[in-house]
Image: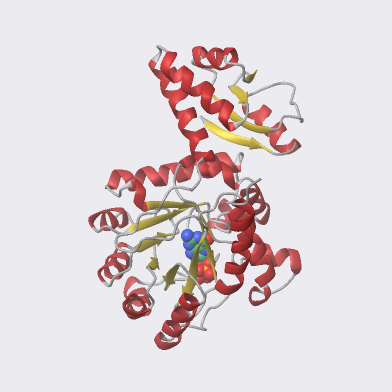
Amino acid sequence: MRLVELQGESDSVAACARIGRGVRDPNLRGWAALLPPEPRALIEGLRQSGVAVLRGEKGALVLGSLSQLWSAARSLADALEDGRARALAIDLQTRAGRVEAFPRPRWRLPRSRLPEGRVLLMAVLNVTPDSFSDGGRYAAKDAAIEHGLRLAAEGADLLDVGGESTRPGSAPVPPDEELGRTLPVVRELVLRARIPVSIDTTKAEVARAAIDAGAEVVNDVSGLRRDPALAAAVARSDAALCLMHSRGTPQDMQQRAAYGDLLGEVHDELLEALRRGLEAGVAEERIALDPGLGFAKTADHNWLLLRRLRELTQLGRPLLVGASRKSFLGKLSGKPAAERLSASVAAAAVAALHGASLVRVHDVAATREALAVVDAVRSSSS
Ligand code: HH2
């Protein structure tokens, strides 16, 4: 079961195909629940409660506003006798409530309290020789610390320190080298930056040392797929965790950018990542999720994820989105990474408007100004 937002013809036709309808209606719009064909009691109950139901061979599409879907599911959650039907009704009610919920769910960090009521900025600090946009600029410890302090002064809410580039085709870095790059920077910024520090790593060894040095967040671009010891290392501490969607490794991820149903597959794989974290003992309130723009995604996949990002809020966790300076933005303008500021700021604003709780950016001051506009628009009242 999953909620989908039908914004245009292609969404409508794809949703009809998903439920196995012979005739595909291009004119369906708004929110819809994609349900399995059984149990019929649930689908019949929803129909009787007044929402529109379309059936197909493989499932049913239940159309209505989020509040209509929520109310219909809530009445059925009380009334249905069949256990599976009731569980699906509760799931539908929960998901519709999550998409509507504002403020968005909190992300709990061990010591710092993140500001509430606005979209937050995670600033990128790559202590690497080869990152795609700033590789080599902050590879020396002092330059990295100085840059981190500047990003904090510009208004970042978190600093994400990385010691291994994850750009497509990048070579893996041994843990001791990654530690040598990041640990002195994490240690110093924890003392001086006055905002929480995150470690961007897929390795338990690096995460453990960074947490011991005071990092409050572990940002794992593999979504707990790469190092089986990472989840337990985070669970043993009280650190927060960001789980990003990707497939394969940076070496082969772009060959894996093939989806039959992009939103559905990213949703399901993020849910699996969330479950891996929960099963290892990380508290749900400490986990944020990220669709992973540019990771096992083509440019078209990234645009579609940005357009329909709101659907991922049904997972009930804060969403972090990183579009900053990525190559899909350069494809539009033909500009190199260092000249993608306007496009990056626009993408951050779109993500914020479509449900992101945090954006991961290189350019803090400019993004901050743009997000103030988004927050003002969103909180305006009639
Ligand atoms: N993108 C990059 C790295 N880490 N983490 C999250 N959660 N989300 C992202 O989108 C994300 C990320 C890639 O960007 P960058 O760090 O600038 O480059 P590189 O991997 O080359 O160091």
Q: Is residue 46 left or right of residue 111?
A: right
- Out of 143 and 348, give the one closest to the viewer: 348
Q: Can residue 251 be seen by looking at this rendering? A: no
Considering every residue shown, the one lying at the far left of the view is: 236
- Out of 191 and 209, give the one closest to the viewer: 191
Q: Residue 311 in the image: state x and y as whole percent.
A: 57, 41
Q: How many marks?
A: 0
- Out of 34 and 19, give the one closest to the viewer: 34
Q: Is residue 58 left or right of residue 166?
A: right
Q: On the image, which quarter does residue 220 sit in?
A: bottom left
For residue 227, above or below residue 146: above
Q: Residue 251 in the image: state x and y as whole percent.
A: 51, 62
Q: Can residue 2 be seen by looking at this rendering? A: yes
Q: Residue 210 in the image: state x and y as whole percent.
A: 31, 70
Q: Residue 299 in the image: state x and y as whole percent.
A: 66, 56
- Out of 369 and 128, give the one closest to the viewer: 369
Q: Is residue 65 left or right of residue 135?
A: right
For residue 269, above or below residue 292: above
Quadrant of the snapshot with the C terminus: top right
Residue at 43% from the left image edge and 13% from the top image edge: 80
For residue 87, above or below residue 247: above
Residue at 55% from the left image edge and 72% from the top image edge: 364
Q: On the image, which quarter does residue 276 sit in?
A: top left
